[in-house]
Amino acid sequence: MDNNKLTYLIKYLLAERPEISADIPQTADEKFRLYRSLVNTRPAMKADSEYLAAEEDFLKKMTAEKGITDISQLVPYEKNIYLWQGDITTLRCGAIVNAANSGMTGCWHPCHSCIDNCIHTFAGVGLRYECAQLMEAQGHDEPTGSAKITSAYALPCQYVIHTVGPIVSGHLTDDHCRLLKSCYSSCLELAEQKGIKSIAFCCISTGVFGFPQKEAAEIAVSTVREFVKSHDIEVIFNVFSDRDFEIYRKLLG
């Protein structure tokens, strides 16, 4: 981790928001936590070119240190379908899918562990700004089950496709299932329209949105299987937990 560059980034972010009073920590981990908190709570606005170049260089080097996995390194479970357990922000492929909220500008909770937060953190502040521009042009919240595409900025993938999954707060309904299927279909169709040849899906809606993991995986696998029958695209199911890995492994086995 480049401590000097990280210090520069923090000083820039603090100078933008004089209402925030914070001492820059000495340790690298604490320093990055402050940087991430500032990025997570930063309004969707332009940053100058010097900051953006420094941030992109810093984040790309940090991701490289974590280790980048290229789709060419993976072995398919079925024709054009892969299962991979790991950090989606380190995956090099055509597009990764972000499980977004209806506001579409990322997670605003400092250092939250959700995928929306992770993707926006390691892409850089340009991603929130682009998302905000899309939402301003649209004029309303993103509907559940649809999809939007943006650049990937400092991430190793080429694009990020954002989709809003259904929230399950009680019993699972047919409408929840229909909307989740629509998330996968919308992302796949958008990827095809843009000529994207590989896409990595996270486990949409199974975190704080409360969709049962097994049922969500069944919908994901059946929707993707049907799509790849007639389209030239490679699909990665990206999981983080051991439980999700086992659910998908059994479905794809």
Image (tube, rainbow, N blue to C red):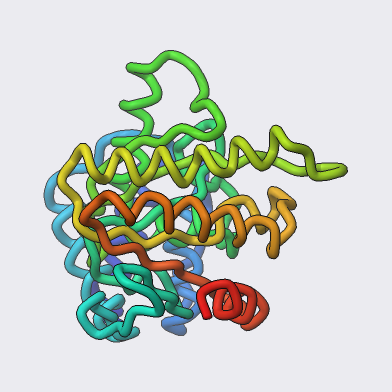
Q: Is residue 186 visible?
A: yes
- Look at 42% across and 52% down and name the residue there: 226
Residue 35 drawn at (x, y percent): 42, 63
In this rendering, the count of numbered labels is: 0
Give the residue furthest to the top: 139
Q: Judge from the rendering whether residue 151 lies leftward or rightward of residue 144; answer left or right.
A: left
Could you say which quadrant of the image residue 186 lies in? top left
Residue 90 drawn at (x, y percent): 33, 73
Judge by depth and name the residue closer to the eye, 177 or 15.
177
Q: Is residue 154 visible?
A: no
Could you say which quadrant of the image residue 121 lies in? bottom left
Q: Judge from the rendering whether residue 98 lies leftward or rightward of residue 164; answer left or right.
A: left
- Look at 51% across and 74% down and name the residue there: 252
- Look at 56% across and 32% down and name the residue there: 144
Residue 166 drawn at (x, y percent): 64, 39
Judge by depth and name the residue closer to the eye, 106 or 201.
201
Give the residue furthest to the right: 170
Judge by depth and name the residue closer to the eye, 178 or 87.
178
- Look at 36% across and 69% down and name the residue there: 81
Judge by depth and name the residue closer to the eye, 15 or 100.
100
Residue 127 drawn at (x, y percent): 32, 45
Q: Quadrant of the N terminus?
A: bottom left
Task: Check the image and report above or below for 191 versus 54.
Answer: above
